Each structure stands twice: as C-alpha cells, then as structure tokens.
Image (cartoon, rainbow, N blue to C red):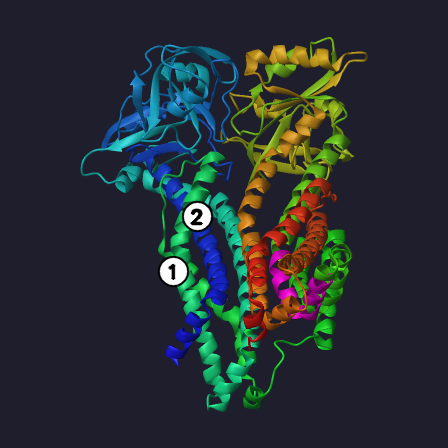
Amino acid sequence: MIGLVFKELWGRKRRMAGSLMAVFLGVTFLTGTLVLGDTLAGSIDGYYANAYGKTDVSVRSSTRVSDQPWGSRGQIDAAVLDRVRQVDGVANAEPVIEGSGQLLAKDGTTIQSRGPRTAGNWMTDPKLNPYRLAEGRAPRAPNEVVINRMFADEGGLAIGDRTAVLTPERVSVTVVGISMFGEEEAFGETSFTAFTLDGAREHVAKSPDRISGVSISADDGVSADELAARVKSVLPSGTEAVTTEAQVEEGMSEVESGFLNIFRTVLGAFGAVALLVAAFSIHNTFAITMAQRTRESALLRALGAGRRQVLTIVGFEALVIGGAATVAGLAGGMGFAELLRRLFTGLRIGIAMEGLTVSATTLLIAVPVGLVVTLIAALGPAVKASRVPPLAALREVAAEAQRPSAARAVVGGVLAAVAAGAVVFGAVAERMTAAGAGALLAVVAMVVLGPAAARPVASLVGGPAARLRGVPGALARGNASRSPHRTAGAAAALMIGVGVVTLMTVFIGSLGASLENSVAGSFKGPIVVNAGNNETGGFSTRLVQEAAKLPQVSAVAGVGSGNLRVDGEPSVVSVADPSALGRVLDLGVDQGALSDAGTFAVSKSVADEKGWSTGSQVDVTFADGAVQRLTVGAVYENTDLTGDYLVPRSEWDAHTRQPLDNRAFVELAPGASTAAVVRALTDLGKQYGAPEVQSRDDFVASQTEEQQGFITVVYGLLILAIVIALMGIANTLSLAVHERTRELGLLRAVGATRPQIRSMVRWESVIVALFGTAGGLGLGLFLGWGLGGALGNPFASPVAQLVVIALVGAVAGALAAIRPARRAARLAILSAISAP
C-alpha cells in the first residue's frame, strides 16, 4: 500500500506540486514569525543581561509607578551611598544619576529616537559601567560629555564638537568621547549622554543631595544574594537592594507580558491566516484530484480494498506531502525570518536584532501544525473517496456534484444571520467580545455559503466577459458556474487574504477618523507645537510661558505626560494647567469644571468604573514616594488628547525636577496671521530643541504615523497569504485543464483557436479571482465597520486603497492563469480528443 501511495504521488507530481507549495509557504510563514519572536526575545534578554555591566547589586527607590520595563523610578537620598560603602563585602559602590536628557544634533534639532532619551553620570569603574569608550576620553569637566555611537552618527557629531543637551534646560556641552554598549552602538535606541558626576548632579539631578541609585560590586567570595541582604539592612525606608539577576528577570517578565506578547500574537495571527489560506488550497486540490480519481477508488474497492484502506491511502498521501513541505518550510522559515529581521531593523523598532535565535518551542509548534493542517484539509476528500461504491468503476462518474445541497444553503444562511447579528450588536453596543465572535462566525458562514453563492455570482461577474470576449468569455463563465464547489474553494482562500487586508485598511482608517473627529471636536485652534510621543522627550515648560507672551497668541496650553500610581494602580497621566487647557480644548466636561489651575480631572469611563464623581478623594503616589490625596474636580468625556487622568501642573512639578511638555495647543489672537505665528513659534522653539510647529491637520496625521507604518508591514506580511491563494487558483485551473483535456480537444477540433483557448482559461481565472476579491472586500468592510464600532471608532472607508485592492485581485487572477492557459492552448488536438 505504501508503494502504491508513492507511485500515485510520482505519477501525479505536477498536480501535487500546488499542495506541497501551499503547505511550504504556510509553514515558512509560521516558522519565520515564530523565529522572529525568538530572536527578538533573545536580543532583549541580551540587552537586559548587559544593562548593568558587571554590577552585582543595585540600590534604587522602592516606589514603582510604571508597569513598563523602561519606566524610571524616583530619586533617593545621596547619603545612602556612604552607608552602602561601609557594608562588609562591598568591593566598590558608585552613585547612579539618570534622567531626561535630549541630545541636540549639529543643526540644533533634537535627535529623534524610539527609545528613552536620557542623561546621567559616566561611571568611572569599568566593571560597573555597561558602556565602554570607543573613541576619545571620559568627561572631566561639568560641561563635557560622552555620547553613544548611534546618536553621534544620527546627529552628525564628532569628538570636539559643541552642542547642547536639554535637561530640560539647555546645557551647552563639548563632546569628548564616543561610547558603545558592549558591541552595540546603543542600548536599543536609548540615547545616553554622560556627564561627570558633578555635571550630572547639577544638570540632571538638580541637587547634590539626590541620586537615582547605587551600583555595587561584591568582594570575591560574596554572592550577590548575600550582599543584597547585607545592604538591605542599612537602607532607609523607600529604598531597596536588588541583585542584577533579579532586575534582568523583572525586566524580561514585563517585556514578555507586554510588548513581546503582543508582538508574538500579531505575528502568530498572520501565520494563522497564511496557514488557513493554505488549508483551503490543499483541500481544493485534494477534492478535485479525489473526484478525478473516482473510478480509481472504485477499482480499489472492487479489488477488495476496504473503506479504511482507501482512507489510509489518501491520508498517507497527505502525510507525505505535509511532511515534505513542512521540512522544506522549516528551512524556508529561517530565510523568511532573516528577511523579517532586516525589515524590522530597517523600520527601527528600537531593538537591534543580530543573528537568528530558534527555540525548541518553535519547532514543536511548526512541525505538528504543518502536518495537522495538511491532514485536516485532506480529511473531507479522503472520507468521500472511501465512500465510493465498487460499481462506480464500471461507469462514467461525474467529477463532482454540480449543485450544492439545500441543507448547505440553509445552514450557511443561519450562520450568516447569526454572525451578522453578533457583529451589528457588538458595533452598536460597543462590545468587542460579541463583534469578535461574530467576525469568526462570519468567516465560517462564508466558507459554508461559498458553493451556494458561486453559481449566481460567477454568472453575474462573468457577464461582462461574455459580452466583451464573445465565445471564450461565455465558456469561461460557464466553466466557473458549472463547478460551484471548485470555484468557491479556489475563491475562498483569496477571499480570506483580501478580507484581512481590507479589514486592516478600514480599521486603521477608522482609527484615524476617530482621532481626527476628536481633535476637531476638542481643539478649534490652528496650531500645535508637537515634540512627539517619546516618554522622556519634550520641551521645557518655559516654551509655553514664552509663547503666551507673543502678541499674536490669545491662549496657549502645554500638556506633558508621566506616571503615577492612581488608586494603587500604575497609570499614565497627562499633566497640564487645567484652567489654561480649558481655554484651548473642549474635553466635554460632564461634571465640575476646568476653571482652576489645581483641578484634578478624570475621564468619564474611569469615573463610572470606579464610582467616582466630583468631590471624590483619590490617593495618588508620585515617583518620589510621596502619597497625596487629590479631589476630583472635573469629569470629562474626550480622552484622545489627554487620556484618562489630568493632573494639575502645580501638583506634578512639586514632585519632579525635570518638568516637560510634549505638546502645546495654540489659539490665535483676532486678526493674527497663522503663517506669522508659525514663524514666531518656530524661532522661539529653536532654543528648546526645535519641536515641530504643525497645523491641526498635520498634527492629526502625525498621531497616526505609527499605525500607518504598522499597516504597511501588515500589507507586506499578508502578501504571502494572497500569493498562496493565487497559487491555489492556478493549481485549480491546472487540474481543471487536465480534467477537460478531451473537451479542449473538441473545442479545437470545431474551430477554436489557441488564443481563444488561452482567453477562456484566463477569463475563468479572473472570474474566480473577482469572486474572491469581491467577497473579501465585502467581508472586510463589514467586519471593519463592526470591530471599529465596537471600539467606538467611526466608520471610514479609504476608497482609493479599496479600488487598488480590487484591481490587484483582478490582475492577480489573470497572472495566475498564465501557465494553465498556455498549457491548455498547447494541447495537441488528436491526442486531446483520444484522452480518457
């Protein structure tokens, strides 16, 4: 029986090539995304392992206000250093000062980065310093600095150059050294500008009595855990001693549960889409070949083979194809992972990924998935083949059922109705769970209803072909209509790929429309000074104070951001003068008012969740460890520009030594020229790192730049899924050409030319592709509306992009038919007519 399987595969190697390629591409996609996740995790782990040099124990503030791995902690008393140095087992201890520090490029603009922009002190002990000098020397004077290689190159800076660092005050400095983080140009994309200890005290800590922490190395024979316990005994309240190993584990745990988990989930979803598309292609190929081998299956039954044996033969064929394709896919996945690594490195995600890392988990996932997907896809055709009666060998048997059953239409209709209801309910009631469940059910309904819809849709879509191309077009429409299961199977794979692309296009468009509507509803002014969204970036609050003095400006309000523990939970908050903010923004205040500079305000969603209202007392913990009870003075609805919490600037500045704004909203004085105000603000901003002065429309566009970059990556990743779908269409046509060999020969015999045969096959492919593309567009638009509505976003359909998707689907259908059409046209007339 095994020999029979291999003979069958070898005899039909061209027919099986499409299935093998579909599995190969699906496993390649899945393996590549899993390996990329492993590589990213390995790179981050390497960064954290080297982030503390060869420090054994660190002393830091015990107050944690951020759940992000890079979230900074407050300062501690510098007197801790002397206590630590007196502990038995301490070989050396150095103070650590770190805070916001934005390095300016040679042209005076802030050097942009995705990672934190920090400044601090240069550690004199190489063992405790994670950085090393690559060029120049260590700083000796308070106005000398060492900068890391990446940002020296980005800013066009070299040793001896004069520049400035914003801390947030502008500090003029001379570059005396270039550093490397081990063998890397930076710690991810973290900008680190190192002063002398005195320089860092003056410019970053703003006090000789405060430091960020202490780095400690242990004497020989003293373990890190033992040293941490000894140091802990001399520390005051509000501080803690932790080993480097514990800090690395803490950081990796936060990354794993946050960014890395999301990253892997998104990539895994793309891999699942590719495998789902591949499964449809495999199923369609096996369904067609099993239908074509009906007499062969019947002969096996007539010769004594049982149903289980026929089922085993088909299953073993699928296993061989799946196994070969999976092994090849593992190798292909490594190449695909390298391609993705280069792509994400080029997009500068903040982590430099060097080399590839492959975990055992990746192999344990990719191999079984490749085999199982192939077996499941072939299960239906295998069961059908095993049920062929032996007498079928004695008569001609139709390749497949010409009409779908009524039960399919009923079941599909019920599923579609339930799915539509769930999506509509989720969109109207803003319930993502219901909308998501409806979306999954909609895909199932689409698959079930596909054959029932194939005949009427193919007739409708093929109408123009019949009118424009005459007989070839009419034959193409007839071929697509007479095999609804085959047409639907080939179109379903493309439908899923196009549907996901359309869904993402609509979703991102809706997100942008939501932000645009929110900004338009909240901010009526024409100008925004925008320093970006970097957590440690921004500009000094003095810029807003200076801007308010311009005669062309009637009102201006700066907004910064930071982290607090609000009601015991780490939270991101906006910081502003509420009374000034109320003059330039309409936040939709539901309770209270933003009339006082000391007003603490919360969003309506948070207030409803926690049962707060105006007058409620809320405990907040600042990074310096101070605990304060704030009174809710206002509750607002519009959160796109301020988030869920608005902390008064007066309260915030009492607990930080580096107050920053990252944007300022500007209203013009009556009669003032927008262009003149832009010029004035641009000139004013040069002393503060030259933040971008934007129109309101440009500001909205800048807020969705990252999402636009993301959807570009999504398009790139989903191209593979669409390629798999098009290969499925090409394979279906090739099998159909083989099946209709005699029919094609008869057409040639009665006068059809080779160009007409090619045209017929091409138009059949275009009809199938348009069926899949139209279905995918419709499904994607509906689900985009539903899922976007569940998140409270307005529906926005980018018409131009959707037209491009439709055109690409049609053109791709024509391209998929090139080889099958050429093969059909080259058939010899007499041999084709005499074919069995």
The Cα–Cα distance between marks 2 and 1, rounded to whole angstroms, is 14 Å
Q: Quadrant of the N terminus?
A: bottom left
Q: 255 and 464: which one is in front?
A: 464
Secondary structure of the residue carrying tag 2 is helix
In the visual, does 779 lie left or right of 8?
right
Q: Is residue 612 visible?
A: no
In the visual, does 53 lie left or right of 788?
left
The x, y position of residue 82, in whole percent, is: 31, 24
Q: Quadrant of the C terminus?
A: bottom right
Q: Vertical placement of 30 versus 486: above or below?
A: above
Q: Quadrant of residue 830?
A: bottom right
The residue that appears at 45% across and 22% down in the rendered structure is 154
Image disc number at residue 327: 1
Q: Quadrant of residue 216?
A: top left
In the visual, does 630 lie left or right of 625?
right
Q: 706 and 88: which one is in front?
A: 706
From which residue to which does the magenta span run? 474-495
Q: 153 and 491: which one is in front?
A: 491
Q: 251 and 831: which one is in front?
A: 831
The x, y position of residue 709, in whole percent, is: 57, 37
Q: Earlier in the sequence, mark 2 or mark 1?
A: 1
Q: Quadrant of residue 453?
A: bottom right
Which residue matches tag 2?
336
The x, y position of residue 757, in whole percent, is: 64, 61
Q: Amino acid at mark 1?
A: Val
Secondary structure of the residue carrying tag 1 is helix
